[in-house]
Image: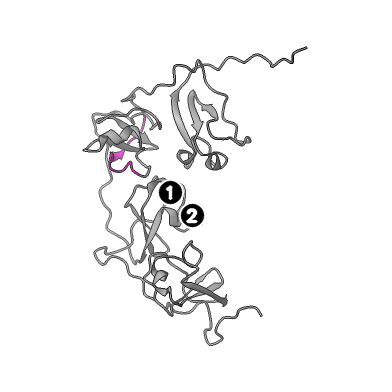
């Protein structure tokens, strides 16, 4: 028989919110599917969602529902925060610890590499965001970040694989980052928005226009020209090389290379930059068969 939801409950329980301290007996909904926190592993309900790896031991699917009922657990937002963080904006590049809100629920970015690919409520949002619970009203506006007035425009766009050093500045979109601090050596290995990069790069403000580069990226001198142009209709494998606008890229994880292009928001997950290139590779001789 198909599972049924308690007829005494006139509607759906609240939608599941990651990070809420659920306890045994709590019920939540994901869409129209209802789950109950129960059993020997109910303590896991506060850590794993019904549809997450590890959550199936704690949550039991009890049926389907329509409408709404009151919440069975009361998630809380940091009392030191008097209102909601700014609304989530899919056009912005978020860093670790940045806070946003969607529909009176606050979220915090935990891994910037995923925060620039997924929104808090997207299917993959749990990879980069955690819920802080409900919030109400809005925070008082903070001063807009500014970029050094002595710099007339944006530094060069960040290029993965470039040997950046302490003091170098780069831009990702209109956001400016500076390589500095005790972990500046990491700047050559991690980007400002990559996991591990927040220790090396500091967000210093916003900018418009362009300025000269602060580091000189290089392309493998053994490569005499640019690889073939990137073609979004092709399925690339690991180690395949392509070029976009005189910058060469190499596929490092084919699973991502077939989803993202090198310059897409999620491109850093599957591609690494080899630096600038010029011209094109000379064609190789056509293979011949021994007569």
Q: Quadrant of residue 231?
A: top right
Q: Are marks 1 and 2 in contact (CB under 8 Å)?
A: yes
Q: Which residue is mark 1?
A: 114
Looking at the image, which residue is at 45% across and 27% down? Answer: 274
Q: Quadrant of residue 120?
A: bottom left
| Left or right side of 7 for 173 | left
Q: Residue furthest front?
A: 290
Looking at the image, which residue is at 57% across and 24% down? Answer: 228
Q: Residues within 10 Å of mark 2 (few under 14, many from 20)?
A: some
Range drawn in magenta: 196-209
Q: Which residue is mark 2?
A: 124
Residue 41: x, y in percent? 43, 73
Q: Is residue 16 above or below residue 276?
A: below
Instruction: In this rendered view, identify the residue nearer to me: 125 or 45.
Output: 45
Residue 107: x, y in percent? 37, 59
The answer to whether residue 171 is seen in the rendering is: yes
* Label 1 vs 2, first from the N-terminus: 1
Q: Residue furthest left?
A: 182
Instruction: In this rendered view, identify the residue nearer to me: 23 or 171.
Output: 23
Check if residue 289 falls in the magenta segment.
no
Indicate the quadrant containing the N terminus: top left, top right, bottom left or bottom right.
bottom right
Q: Residue furthest bottom?
A: 8
Looking at the image, which residue is at 24% across and 34% down? Answer: 148
- Kind of element beneath mark 2: loop
| Left or right side of 206 for 237 | right
Q: Residues within 10 Å of mark 1 (few under 14, many from 20)?
A: many
Looking at the image, which residue is at 41% across and 53% down? Answer: 128
Report, in whole angstroms, how far the alpha carbon at label 1 lies from the one at label 2. 8 Å
Indicate the quadrant containing the C terminus: top left, top right, bottom left or bottom right.
top right
Q: Is residue 232 above or below residue 49?
A: above
């Amino acid at each position: 028989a198909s599972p049924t939801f308690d007829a005494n409950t006139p509607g759906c329980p609240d939608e599941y919110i990651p990070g809420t301290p659920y306890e045994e007996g709590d019920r939540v909904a994901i869409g129209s599917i209802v789950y109950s926190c129960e059993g020997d592993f109910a303590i896991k309900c506060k850590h794993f969602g019904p549809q997450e790896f590890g959550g199936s031991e704690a949550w039991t699917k009890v049926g389907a529902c329509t409408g709404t009922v009151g919440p069975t657990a009361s998630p809380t937002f940091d009392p030191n925060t008097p209102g909601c963080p700014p609304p989530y904006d899919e056009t912005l590049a978020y860093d670790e610890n940045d806070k946003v809100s969607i529909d009176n629920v606050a979220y915090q970015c935990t891994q910037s590499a995923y925060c620039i690919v997924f929104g808090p409520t997207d299917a993959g949002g749990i990879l980069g965001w955690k819920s802080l619970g409900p919030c109400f009203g809005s925070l008082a506006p903070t001063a807009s970040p500014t970029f050094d007035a002595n710099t007339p425009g944006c530094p060069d766009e960040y290029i993965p694989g470039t040997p950046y050093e302490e003091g170098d500045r780069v831009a990702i979109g209109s956001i400016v980052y500076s390589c500095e601090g005790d972990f500046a050596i990491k700047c050559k290995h991690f980007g400002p928005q990559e996991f591990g990069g927040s220790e090396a790069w500091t967000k210093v403000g916003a900018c418009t226009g362009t300025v000269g580069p602060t580091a000189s990226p290089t392309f493998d001198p053994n490569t005499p020209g640019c690889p073939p142009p990137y073609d979004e209709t092709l399925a690339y494998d690991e180690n395949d090389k392509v070029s976009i606008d005189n910058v060469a890229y190499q596929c490092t994880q084919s699973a991502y290379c077939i989803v993202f292009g090198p310059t897409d928001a999620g491109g850093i997950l599957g591609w690494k930059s080899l630096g600038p290139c010029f011209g094109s590779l000379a064609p190789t001789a056509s293979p011949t068969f021994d007569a």
